[in-house]
């Protein structure tokens, strides 16, 4: 069945219209099961191959020839052409389609997420969609095995069509987003790429070592507009860490927060700890925690208050003087848990 499915799909790709191709895929699959089963119901379908109602034949389409010894051997080696993938691409959102896949009476398909968006009208021919499922195409998809979309980043896995999406949401090779919070940066890439981007494009300070001692100065501490003040990258233990320090509004009160993020996945971040200390006038505050992965967005970490938080009055007290200028010295260190 696997060989026949592949051969039939390749024939269908020569069709001038995608809708016609989908109808023919449905017919060929039914014929294939028909010959293997001998069921009278299949004989009736074969005598009327142009009339296929997927909603009435769902059980038929879910049947599979389990006695064919060649099927298991051939299926893993099926080569999926780009044209077959195009059949599984929603014409509205251009994403891969997953059950339930809907179709109009002319065989044009679209995903279930886009059906409400087109007001029950086929985006290709404008005919009413109704509630017809394209079980034939769902069956085709179930037979496919595809590479991860992050193949170019190093993932070499091959996954069944319906398992691929879940894998990609957790793939360790998926690219990272730029952790710079001062702009809506859309750059993505692996860690070396992101580090180079931060250095060259955002002009971020880069430091080696696991200890730090930074001074933050602001002439008018009463101006708080959720603005990022500082991002510094540290290289230690063969890894990279981002130290954030910024002001933001918490309710009606402005506060300052400092926190560390790990440039890697969360399971690796848990191998490290860090401490932050700020003080002045004989007082000090200390924070100790685990760095968050840059998989978590900057806003998510900040809004969870997972870091050293300093109220403005306390920050000005640490600054000394006439309390009209913010002068904070933040020290800290990073260490690896044994």
Image (cartoon, rainbow, N blue to C red):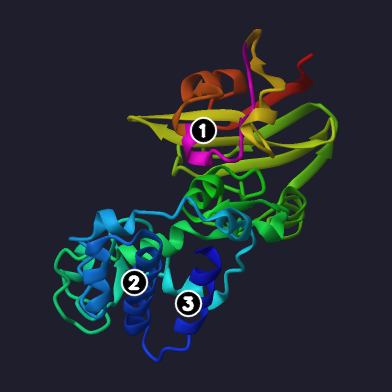
Q: Position of residue 329 (x, y in %)?
A: 69, 25
Compare marks 1 and 2 and give the one earlier in the sequence.
Answer: 2
Who comes first in sequence, dot 2 or dot 3?
3
- Pick out the residue farthest to the top: 282
Which residue is at the front of the view, 254 or 276?
276
Is the residue under label 3 in contact with that under label 1 (CB below 8 Å)? no
Residue 237 lies in quadrant: top right
Give the residue at x 63% y 56%.
Answer: 73
Per the image, the residue denoted by label 1 is 301
Relative side of 166 to 318, left or right: left
Q: Residue 94, percent across and down?
A: 41, 70
Return the x and y of residue 83 as percentages of the image width and height: 51, 78
Whether residue 312 is in magenta: the answer is no
- In the image, residue 274 sits, relative to residue 170, either above or below, namely above
**Residue 8 against residue 67 in the figure, above or below:** below
In the displayed image of the protein, which residue is found farthest to the bottom? 16
Examine the rendering and report whether any part of residue 113 can be seen.
no
Q: Would residue 25 be seen by someone viewing this image from the given angle?
A: yes
Q: Residues within 10 Å of mark 2 (few under 14, many from 20)?
A: many
The disc placed on residue 26 is: 2
Residue 311 percent location from the top left of the image: 48, 22
Cβ atoms at labels 1 and 2 below 8 Å apart: no
Distance from the alpha carbon under mark 2 to that under mark 3 = 10 Å
- Disc 3: which residue: 8
For the residue pair 82 and 94, the one nearer the viewer reads as 82
Instruction: Rate crowding at label 1 as few (under 14), some (14 to 19) or many (20 or more) other CA atoms within 10 Å.
Output: some
Look at the image and give the residue range highlighted in magenta.
285-302
| Total labels drawn | 3
What numbered label is drawn on residue 319? none
């Amino acid at each position: 069945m696997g060989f026949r499915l592949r051969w039939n799909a390749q024939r269908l790709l020569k069709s001038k219209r995608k809708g016609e191709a989908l109808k023919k895929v449905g017919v060929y699959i039914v014929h294939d099961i028909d010959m293997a089963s001998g069921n009278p119901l299949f004989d009736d379908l074969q005598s009327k191959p142009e009339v296929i109602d997927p909603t009435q034949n769902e059980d038929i389409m879910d049947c599979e020839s389990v006695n064919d010894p060649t099927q298991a051997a051939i299926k893993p080696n099926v080569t999926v052409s780009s044209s077959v993938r195009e059949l599984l691409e929603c014409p509205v959102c251009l994403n891969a389609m997953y059950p339930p896949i809907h179709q109009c009476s002319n065989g044009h398909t679209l995903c279930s997420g886009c059906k409400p968006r087109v007001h029950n009208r086929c985006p290709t021919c404008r005919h009413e969609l109704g509630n017809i499922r394209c079980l034939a195409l769902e069956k085709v998809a179930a037979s496919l095995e595809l590479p991860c979309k992050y193949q170019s980043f190093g993932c070499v896995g091959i996954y069944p069509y319906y398992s691929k999406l879940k894998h990609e949401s957790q793939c360790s090779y998926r690219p990272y987003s730029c952790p710079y919070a001062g702009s809506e940066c859309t750059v993505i890439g692996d860690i070396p790429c992101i580090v180079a981007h931060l250095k060259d494009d955002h002009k971020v300070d880069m430091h080696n070592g696991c200890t730090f001692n930074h001074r933050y100065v602001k002439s008018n501490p009463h101006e708080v507009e959720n603005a990022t003040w500082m991002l510094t990258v540290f290289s230690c233990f063969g890894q990279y860490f981002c130290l954030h320090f910024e002001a933001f509004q918490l309710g009606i009160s402005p506060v300052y927060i400092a926190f560390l993020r790990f440039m890697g996945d969360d399971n690796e971040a848990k191998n490290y700890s860090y401490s932050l200390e700020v003080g002045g006038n004989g007082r000090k505050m200390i924070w100790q925690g685990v760095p968050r992965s840059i998989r978590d967005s900057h806003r998510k970490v900040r809004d969870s208050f997972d870091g050293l938080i300093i109220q403005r009055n306390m920050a000005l007290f640490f600054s000394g003087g006439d309390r009209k200028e913010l002068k904070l010295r933040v020290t800290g260190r990073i260490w690896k848990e044994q």
